[in-house]
Each structure stands twice: as C-alpha cells, then as structure tokens.
Image: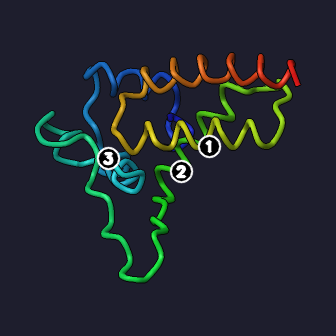
C-alpha cells in the first residue's frame, strides 16, 4: 500500500497507527484508490467510496475501479513475490482480492487473506 501511495513503509505505518496525520497529497491518492476521505480523516461513514453507477446498456458487465484493481494487483504481486503461479491461478488471486478491496476490508485483513489464498492456489497448482 505504501508503494501505491508513494510513501515509505514507516510513514504508512505511522499513518495507519494514527501517529501521523494524513496530508492532502496522500489523501488525494487514497481517494483515487477508492477510499472515502471522510472515513480516512474521521472514521465516520463507509470506508470505501460509493461504486460508480453501472452503465445503462443491455449487458450485465460491471465496471472495474482502476484504483481498487491496482490495490488488488499490488497485493497479489507482493504475496506471490518470486514464487511461480500459473496465470489462471494468479487471475483467481487478483479477482478474489479485488472483491475484498471493493468490500472495504482493512489492509491487514487483505494481506492475511492474500497469503491464505496464495497457499491454497499453490497447492492446487502443484497437484495439477
């Protein structure tokens, strides 16, 4: 998450603990990633911004939020690291993490979920 916000890990840690106030530049980046600025600053309201309204068309395709997708991909890359994971399994990991990000799960929960999902996917990949 610190990489997405273009800040150091220690700065992100201080922000998350409340030991440092969120500046305008970081708040702007958080909003671009789908976080609700009011929640970030006060803890009130939903943690995530409202999803964009679906397009009015005959298809049931929902729009992906690029910022939230970037968070899911960044987290997937972080937990996969140098391990090899087949493309289809990687896509499953990113998809599950994207759904969790959209649902507003806290970062530490997302990271733990990513590690658990990866362990299961690696077992599945090895058994094929």
Upstream in sequence: badge 3 or badge 2: 3
The 10 Å Cα crowd at callout 3, few under 14, some 14 to 19, many 20 or more, is: many
Image quadrant occupied by the C terminus: top right
Q: Secondary structure at mark 1?
A: helix
Residue at position x 59%, y 17% in the image: 116
Residue 41, x across and y down, in percent = 18, 39
Q: Nearer the viewer, residue 122 or 75?
A: 122
Q: Is residue 78 above or below residue 62?
A: above
How many other residues sit within 10 Å of disc 1, few (<14), some (14-19) or many (≥20)? some
Disc assigned to residue 69: 2
Q: Earlier in the sequence, mark 1 or mark 3?
A: 3
Q: Rounded to the nearest whole Å, what is the CA distance between mark 1 and mark 3?
A: 17 Å
Locate residue 103, reporting x and y percent. 35, 40
Q: Which residue is mark 3?
A: 35
Of residues 8 and 126, which is closer to you in this image? Answer: 126
The residue that mark 1 highlights is 73
Depth check, front residue: 101 or 124? 124
Horizontal side of 112 relative to 54 (left or right) equals right
Using residue 122 as the reference point, say whether residue 22 is left or right of it. Answer: left
Q: Relative to 27, is 110 above or below?
A: above
> In x, y percent, where is residue 70?
56, 49
Secondary element at image label 2 = helix
Q: Badge 2 local density, few (<14 within 10 Å), some, or many (20+)?
A: many
Badge number at residue 2? none
């Amino acid at each position: 998450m610190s990489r997405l916000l273009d800040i150091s890990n220690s700065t992100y840690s201080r922000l998350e603990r409340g030991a440092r106030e969120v500046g305008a530049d970081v708040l702007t980046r958080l909003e671009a990633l789908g976080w609700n600025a009011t929640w970030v600053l006060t803890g009130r309201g939903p943690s995530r911004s409202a999803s964009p309204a679906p397009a009015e068309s005959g298809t049931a395709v929902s729009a992906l939020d690029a910022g939230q997708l970037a968070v899911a991909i960044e987290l997937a890359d972080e937990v996969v690291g140098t391990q090899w994971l087949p493309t289809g399994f990687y896509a499953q990991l990113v998809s599950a993490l994207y759904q969790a990000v959209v649902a507003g799960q806290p970062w530490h929960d997302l990271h733990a979920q990513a590690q658990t999902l990866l362990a299961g996917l690696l077992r599945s990949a090895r058994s094929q």
